[in-house]
């Protein structure tokens, strides 16, 4: 074990720009669009992929021999508050939830902690990009998409202010036990009213946008404008069949161009509806209990598969889990594959599909010429815990450190015991 | 008795409702009425089973003098002829709070909990109030009394419905006319108990059901100790408890499993409780029967759910729907199983709901005689008052009902409810039965009038040919008023007439729409009006009851699965032993045990399971689970060694089944981490379908939960008053408790008469190495500290659970000899897990510790195989080593490795057949077997899913029919179902 050495590589020091061409040879390349190239050659220069193909593809610059290993596009974690909270129980470290019901002008990017130890711990598992979203309220705020190796938030930004996050009300709600009600679910009498409040806000924002310039600025309404011209997406958190139908119908009626469902516990029941309305789903991670006693024990496991088979555009998220869990993103996809979904399709749930849903597919999500060299090499199948062991990882062609606070402690204590 | 005298004095000073014979009377002359009243020619129910046709009931001075066929009627008797009518003993409700106001909730004092008792000179816990006397709070409530009398009751047992020990009750006759001196039959009618805390005190302890149980046990042993004169101080609570020891003890348990919990406490202290149940006893009849206890059963059958909205329906489980469907069977099934029970109106909104629910129970086959007993002789016996109430034998109070016919017939009218010889008219019995068909001529037309319904509450129907007109009838004191609207002319006709005694017809005045008046005559037509048609319909609607399953929730078994001999052929066998992983191997299971492991084994009659391409392992064991429990933390004290999770195991938790589907066969349910010394564990085999006792290991190793760090310091919520607030304090708390335990034991050994203290007893077990500690722990300082405390007291910590900084002190742990049960990769959720690393397990294992991966989470527990696999990624463990972290290693930590945890001849057949390499993210458990019984089978699961769907559809349809038939329904509501973690307190 002494092999591990004693010097901890400096963590969190972002890697320098790519200066020479790099070629990765011999790996099984999982493209992220459902296809695989065995014994592949991939070349990238100045942060972009310049060539990818079979063994006959010419190499260039520094060569990394990845014979027997696997090559993947960087995994993408949507709808998380990574970098907005460090330790959940320590309030001082928590910047994820601002006061207010409708606050689209609240922006996650400027609070994103590029030096978060939690963010850093994503990388050794292949999770290299994320959508950082504010939490709570009705409209929680505006997210941005970042890469996970940066000096500061400006540096980290991949897509600034990409989307607005809306928590759709529930038609049933839990009893408020702290007021003496029992905890069971009961009909939410305010459901219609809550929807109306959201609609009123959207209508006002729209009216504001059609108004003349020079009026008193309203930052909240201003932040909403991208929803009406399609430059921003609306991420709608909803689980129930009724809630999803209400959300999609109401939002489309009121001029919102791009709606993405986040959650979708019952999305499998309304696949034709979602398909007709062209709604992608960022489905909840399979590592969850069924919501109802009578549900199939494996419903959360197989739900993403059901949606893919139904022809929807599907990505995986773990919005309701602690941030640190996001490093398990590859294993969520693996677990779905265990339910009978083709492994490469399962991989799409955290790569190509997610990039499409987030609108960053021009640069990220798959291994293709012209796209960012955001990718990694794993000793084995990266969707399985046993073989997700990274040897190299790159973000925009920069070779990033795979060390973390955690690997440093590991080495430090193995060193302690090796002395004894 | 002192209190009783005080009360009598009090009574004198207020008013004299009815003069006692030795009381002076200044309001008139003192005369005596010694006349008799004789009720003759009645169908007389002396008891529910002793029925006399044409019987006579003779009463005098509020009591029965004689009852039977040939009764000598004295000459100074008023005779009342009850030809065609019935007499029954009036009903008794043994469980009410009649005349006793609900105690007021204690005012809050912010968020900070109250740990000490509010009272002085009483028991140390405010929720124990055996000194309370309902008689001191009793205020006779005439309005309520009237409601009860209308429902047929004559005597009620009442008490202060508040607290865990509630004091004594009052047995009172519903006699409005005479004073308390007469109507109070017994002012010490019993002692009352429950599991619910008093609303009058904010004292925290107990916060949980298991805490309430421990408190009751301690209360009884303290009472015994006190009775022997061991206390230096006076405790009025214990004195009262002891003084009332010979009274009947009533226990409001409120649900099937709580019934059994109460019964167990009673058994331990020689108390034979009369248990107030929950109406769900039918779900565990065997245990109820076995308890051999007497029960009081509420008749609050649930209304159907309104399932017309499918989006709302989904919030109901099939178990919720079944409850509606099956609950009306409860009285029948209890009585078929010879469970002795009385009925009560407790949990009904008003006593008037009793009859409807009884009728419902009858349609489900409940025997009417049994019901009558459950309302009369049985409660009388429970109350030790059979010589006074419950029957009409001579000497009993003259508490009886006069009815128009058999008491439980739908059409029967209750005429009079006599209490202690005082007549209360409910409906006049002299009213003539005028039901029938009539013809009335009015305004030149002849209308057909049909009168049906109850004699006293008639329903009218007015028609000409096939056309029906809206009508209304009122009938009282022999006068009848009928109004109807002729819709063809929109004219309103009103009639009013007197019913003559000896005539079939009736006549009177008819008010025409014009305002003119004229005489009318309603002429009775031949033939009787029958509602046979409707009856027939009811017959067709024979109540279909869906079968009970084990447990009685979705995915329960219709018949419990049986042990099976089986031979797994050609599997990849993960032995978890030195033999390692065997390729193409066979495993033979017989009589619940693994009998051989090898190649080409002979089946010898065992079922052969082709396991080609599959992997067979020992069942997964979760060292740290909180599923299948009704409560997890007793947070009311900083030490709660006296509580045990074994008291609150929930065998119906669907997470048991879901865990099985993840290959889990054994779990330890740990107490939570609210306090440094937590509660005792329950170690279970997940035998889905068995009751709580059936799940708990036989000869279970003894464990207790300890906890360190932020939770026990209450760092993450606003609480600044409970010791300890720092890690420094945590150490001293342990030292203090173990010092006290040592002293306790020494005293006991010396023969000194020591107050039995369940908490100390448990701590002594720890000191003596008979009980093992699994300690919730995070940072290295506290881990090290606890080992040092243990070493000082000469015992060993068995397991550190969570142990996220174990890797920093793995060498010290090895030296101490403690094992580790940790998360694979959790961190960042609170300050003390800053240095938690996923390499923890691998580092500790490399230092030679026994390391397990646990869940602390009902979701993660069902894929512990994946969590174990992370040991390969983080720190490079071998696959076999990683696999042991969820099988043989936790078995070792739990001291059950001689029985389970690996595949070895002689061990329990706790096995999982996996579709793939068990550490692979792609693997599924296909069969999960415990003691040779297959509790999960992926193919059977597919069938069960379909069954759940079919049954839901069936019940939804039945409920829709119920709604469409006009029955009352309620909005769907999800169950109060909770997932627990260590930190769950509320």
Image: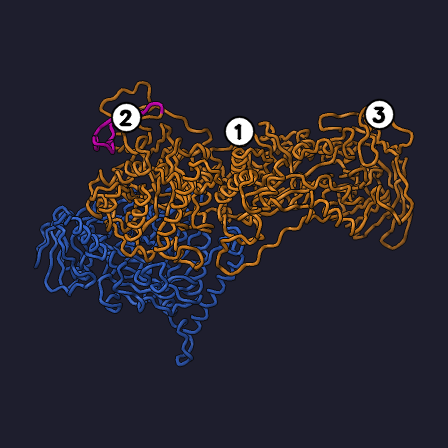
Apparent colour of chain A: blue
Query: Which disc is residue B905 wearing?
Result: 2
Q: Chain of mark 2?
A: B
**How many C-alpha atoms fall within 10 Å of the one at disc 1: few (<14), some, or many (≥20)?**
few
Q: Which chain is orange?
A: B
* Chain-order first, disc 2 or disc 3: 3
Find the magenta span and give its range. Answer: B569-591
Tag 3 or tag 1, which sits nearer the N-term? 3
Query: Which element carries disc 2, helix, strand or loop?
Result: loop
Position of the N terminus of chain B by quadrant: top right
Residue under label 3, please give it: B71
- Whether tag 2 and tag 1 are in contact, CB under 8 A, the answer is no
Query: Which residue occupies the foreground of this view, B855 or A48?
Result: B855
As measured in the structure, the alpha-carbon distance from the residue carrying label 2 to the one carrying label 1 is 36 Å
Q: Is residue A71 visible?
A: no
Q: Is residue B382 magenta?
A: no
Q: Main secondary structure of the magenta part?
A: strand
Q: Is residue A312 left or right of residue B93?
A: left
Q: CA distance from mark 1 to mark 3?
A: 44 Å
Q: Is residue B633 left or right of residue B298?
A: left
Snapshot quadrant of residue B543: top right
Q: Residue at x 63, y 46 (%)?
A: B132
The residue at which mark 1 appears reads as: B290
């Amino acid at each position: 074990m002494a092999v591990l050495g004693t010097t901890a590589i400096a963590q969190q020091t972002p890697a320098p720009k790519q200066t020479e061409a790099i070629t990765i040879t011999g790996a099984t390349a999982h493209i992220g669009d459902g296809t695989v190239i065995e014994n592949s050659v991939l070349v990238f220069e100045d942060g972009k992929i310049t060539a990818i193909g079979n063994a006959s593809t010419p190499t260039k610059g520094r060569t990394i021999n990845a014979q027997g290993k696997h090559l993947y596009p960087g995994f993408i974690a949507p709808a998380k508050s990574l970098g907005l909270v460090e330790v959940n129980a320590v309030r001082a470290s928590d910047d994820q939830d601002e006061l207010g019901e409708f606050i689209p002008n609240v922006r996650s990017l400027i609070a994103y902690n590029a030096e978060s130890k939690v963010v850093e711990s994503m990388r050794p598992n292949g999770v290299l990009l994320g959508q950082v979203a504010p939490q709570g309220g009705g409209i929680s705020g505006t997210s941005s998409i970042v890469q996970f190796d940066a000096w500061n938030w400006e540096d980290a930004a991949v897509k600034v202010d990409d989307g607005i996050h809306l928590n759709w009300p529930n038609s049933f709600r839990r009893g408020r036990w702290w007021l003496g009600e029992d905890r069971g679910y009961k009909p939410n009498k305010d459901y219609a009213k809550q929807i109306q409040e959201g609609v009123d806000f959207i209508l006002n924002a729209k009216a504001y946008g059609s108004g003349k310039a020079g009026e008193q600025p309203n930052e909240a309404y201003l932040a909403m404008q991208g929803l009406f011209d399609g430059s921003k997406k609306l991420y709608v958190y909803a689980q129930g069949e009724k809630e999803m139908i209400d959300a999609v119908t109401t939002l489309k009626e009121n001029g919102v161009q791009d709606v993405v469902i986040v959650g979708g516990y019952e999305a499998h029941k309304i696949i034709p509806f979602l398909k007709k309305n062209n709604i992608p789903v960022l489905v909840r991670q399979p590592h969850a209990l069924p919501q109802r006693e009578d549900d199939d024990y494996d419903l959360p496991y197989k739900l993403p598969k059901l949606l893919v088979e139904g022809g929807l555009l599907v990505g995986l998220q773990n919005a309701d889990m602690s941030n640190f869990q996001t490093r398990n993103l590859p294993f969520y996809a693996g677990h779905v594959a265990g339910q009978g979904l083709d492994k490469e399709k399962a991989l799409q749930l955290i790569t190509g599909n997610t990039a499409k849903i987030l609108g960053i597919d021009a640069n990220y999500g798959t291994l293709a010429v012209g796209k960012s060299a955001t990718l990694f090499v794993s000793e084995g199948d990266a969707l399985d815990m046993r073989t997700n062991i990274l040897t190299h990882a790159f973000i925009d062609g920069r070779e990033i450190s795979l060390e973390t606070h955690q690997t440093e402690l590991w080495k430090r204590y193995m060193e302690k015991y090796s002395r004894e | 008795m002192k209190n009783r005298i005080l009360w009598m004095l009090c009574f004198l000073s207020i008013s004299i409702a009815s003069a006692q014979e030795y009381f002076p009377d200044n309001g008139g002359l003192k005369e005596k009425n010694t006349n008799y009243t004789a009720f003759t020619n009645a169908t007389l129910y002396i008891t529910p089973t002793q029925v006399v046709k044409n019987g006579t009931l003779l009463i005098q001075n509020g009591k029965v003098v004689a009852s039977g066929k040939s009764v000598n009627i004295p000459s100074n008797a008023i005779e009342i002829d009850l030809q065609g009518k019935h007499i029954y003993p009036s009903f008794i409700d043994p469980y009410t709070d009649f005349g006793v106001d609900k105690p007021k909730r204690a005012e809050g004092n912010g968020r900070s909990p109250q740990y000490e008792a509010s009272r002085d000179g009483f028991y140390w816990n405010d929720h124990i109030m055996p000194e309370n006397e309902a008689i001191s709070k009793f205020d006779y409530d005439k309005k309520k009394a009237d409601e009860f009398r209308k429902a047929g009751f004559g005597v009620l047992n009442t008490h202060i419905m508040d607290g865990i020990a509630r004091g004594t009750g009052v047995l009172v006759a519903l006699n409005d006319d005479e004073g308390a001196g007469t109507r109070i039959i017994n002012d010490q009618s019993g002692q009352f108990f429950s599991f619910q805390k008093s609303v009058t005190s904010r004292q925290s302890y107990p916060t949980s059901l298991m805490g309430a149980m421990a408190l009751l046990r301690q209360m009884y042993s303290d009472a015994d100790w006190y009775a022997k004169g061991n206390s230096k101080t006076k405790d009025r609570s214990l004195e009262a408890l002891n003084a009332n020891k010979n009274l009947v003890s009533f226990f409001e348990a409120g649900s099937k499993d709580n019934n059994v919990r109460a019964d167990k406490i009673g058994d331990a202290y020689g108390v034979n409780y009369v248990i107030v149940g929950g109406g769900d006893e039918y779900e565990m009849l065997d245990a109820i029967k076995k308890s051999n206890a007497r029960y009081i059963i509420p008749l609050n059958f649930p209304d159907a759910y309104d399932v017309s909205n499918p989006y709302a329906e989904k919030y109901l489980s099939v178990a919720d729907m079944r409850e509606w469907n099956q609950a009306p069977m409860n009285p029948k099934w209890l009585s078929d199983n010879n469970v002795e029970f009385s009925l009560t109106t407790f949990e009904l909104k008003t006593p008037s709901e009793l009859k409807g629910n009884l009728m419902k129970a009858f349609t489900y086959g409940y025997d009417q005689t049994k019901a009558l007993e459950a309302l009369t002789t049985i409660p009388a016996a429970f109350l030790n008052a059979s010589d006074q109430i419950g029957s009409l034998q001579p000497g009993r109070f003259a508490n009886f009902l006069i009815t128009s016919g058999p008491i439980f017939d739908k059409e029967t009218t209750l005429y009079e409810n006599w209490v202690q010889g005082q007549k209360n008219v409910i409906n006049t019995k002299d009213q003539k039965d005028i039901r029938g068909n009539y013809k009335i001529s009015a305004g030149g037309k002849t209308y057909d009038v049909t009168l049906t319904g109850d004699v006293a509450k008639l329903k009218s129907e007015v028609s000409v040919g096939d056309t029906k007109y809206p009508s209304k009838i009122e009938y009282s004191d022999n006068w009848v008023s009928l109004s109807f609207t002729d819709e063809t002319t929109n004219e309103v006709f009103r009639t009013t007439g007197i019913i003559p005694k000896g005539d079939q017809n009736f006549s009177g005045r008819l008010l025409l729409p014009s305002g003119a008046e004229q005489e009318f005559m309603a002429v009775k037509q031949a033939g009787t009006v029958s509602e046979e048609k409707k009856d027939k319909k009811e017959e067709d609607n024979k109540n279909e009851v869906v079968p009970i399953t084990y447990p009685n929730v979705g995915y329960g078994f219709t018949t419990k699965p049986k042990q099976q001999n089986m031979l797994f052929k050609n599997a990849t066998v993960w032995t978890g032993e030195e033999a390692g992983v065997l390729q193409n191997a066979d495993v033979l299971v017989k009589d619940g045990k693994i009998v051989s492991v090898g190649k080409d084994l002979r089946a010898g009659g065992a079922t052969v399971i082709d396991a080609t391409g599959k992997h067979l392992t020992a069942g997964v064991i979760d060292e740290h689970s909180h599923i299948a429990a009704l409560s997890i933390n007793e947070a009311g004290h900083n030490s709660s060694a006296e509580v045990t999770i074994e008291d609150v195991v929930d065998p119906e938790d669907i997470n048991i089944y879901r865990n099985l589907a993840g290959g889990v066969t054994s779990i330890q349910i740990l107490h939570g981490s609210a306090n440094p010394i937590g509660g005792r564990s329950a170690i279970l085999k997940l035998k889905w379908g068995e009751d709580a006792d059936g799940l708990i290991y036989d000869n279970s190793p003894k464990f207790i939960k300890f906890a360190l760090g932020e939770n026990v310091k209450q760092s993450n919520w606003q609480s600044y008053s409970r010791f300890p607030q720092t890690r420094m304090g945590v150490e001293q708390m342990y030292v203090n408790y173990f010092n006290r335990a040592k002293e306790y034991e020494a005293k006991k050994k010396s023969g000194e008469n020591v107050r039995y203290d369940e908490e100390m007893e448990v701590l002594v077990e720890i000191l003596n190495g008979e009980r093992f500690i699994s300690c919730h722990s995070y940072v290295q300082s506290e881990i090290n500290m606890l080992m040092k405390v243990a070493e000082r007291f000469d015992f060993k910590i068995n397991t550190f659970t969570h142990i996220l900084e174990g890797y920093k002190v793995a060498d010290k742990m090895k030296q101490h000899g403690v094992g580790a049960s940790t998360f694979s990769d959790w961190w960042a959720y609170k300050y003390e897990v800053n240095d938690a690393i996923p390499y923890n397990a691998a580092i500790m294992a490399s230092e030679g510790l026994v390391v397990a991966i646990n869940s602390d989470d009902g979701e993660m527990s069902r894929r512990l195989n994946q969590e174990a696999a992370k040991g390969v990624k983080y720190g490079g463990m071998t696959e076999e080593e990683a696999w042991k972290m969820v099988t043989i290693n936790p078995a070792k930590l739990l001291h059950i490795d001689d029985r389970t945890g690996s595949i070895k001849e002689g061990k329990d057949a706790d096995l999982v057949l996996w579709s793939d390499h068990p550490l692979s993210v792609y693997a599924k458990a296909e069969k999960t077997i415990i003691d040779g019984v297959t509790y999960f089978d992926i193919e059977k699961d597919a069938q069960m899913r379909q069954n759940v769907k079919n049954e839901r559809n069936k019940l939804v349809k039945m409920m829709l029919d119920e709604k469409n038939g006009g029955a009352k329904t309620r909005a769907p509501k999800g169950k109060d179902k909770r997932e627990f973690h260590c930190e769950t307190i509320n």
